[in-house]
Image (cartoon, rainbow, N blue to C red):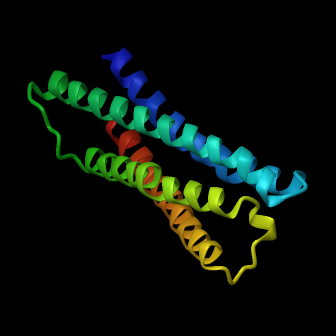
Amino acid sequence: MTLLRSLKLLALITWIGGIIFFAFVLAPTVFRVLPTREMAGNVVNPSLKALHWMGIVSGVVFLLCSLLLDREQYARFKPATLANSLAVLMLAITLVSEFGIAPRMRSLRAEMVSIDNVPVTDARRVEFNRLHQWSTRSEEGVFFLGLVVVVLTAKRLD
């Protein structure tokens, strides 16, 4: 039971910690330090993909451990807990971001070649900026839902 509980917590820490590092350290640093937005995007894009995959794996591990722990503790599966439901929602948002939003953003970046040289009124850049807002909102959503899951998980560990 200790191993499952530890894996469950590690998965949640990895997921939320990754978002914190990405949003508050990596992205702001590369956009401040690198000379062009294009270069910063070349760092952020694969980093975001890695972050999403960390979230996907962490979400699956969290849910599996949670279900197994509930089965051990209560002698039955209890999949519809609030923490599990929020983790499923976090996972769904992450999947939409990785397989829905991000590919379109990559395609638009490739079409524009250098985003720094494309006017802000260009339809591709307007669409890219709109998708970027959705990407940012999705990460924020996963982060805030994750904080709620942290609190709910901490309460269950008492």
How many badges with numbers are in the image?
0
Rendered location of residue 106, percent (x, y): 58, 54
Q: Judge by depth and name the residue closer to the eye, 51 or 141.
A: 51
Q: Judge by depth and name the residue closer to the eye, 146 or 107.
A: 107
Rendered location of residue 141, percent (x, y): 46, 60
Q: Is residue 88 left or right of residue 34?
A: left
User: Which residue of the protein is positioned furthest toward the bottom in this rendering?
Assistant: 121
* Image quarter of residue 68: top left
The relative height of residue 112 versus residue 79 in the rendered view (above or below) is: below
Whether residue 109 can be seen here = yes
The relative height of residue 68 versus residue 23 in the rendered view (above or below) is: above
* Image quarter of residue 75: top left
| Quarter that holds the N terminus | top left
Rendered residue at 24%/26% (across/down): 69
Whether residue 17 can be seen here = no
Rendered residue at 51%/54% (across/down): 102
Q: Is residue 30 left or right of residue 148?
A: right
Rendered residue at 77%/56% (across/down): 38
| Quarter that holds the C terminus | top left
Q: Judge by depth and name the residue closer to the eye, 133 or 19.
A: 133
Rendered residue at 72%/59% (across/down): 113
Q: Is residue 96 left or right of residue 48?
A: left
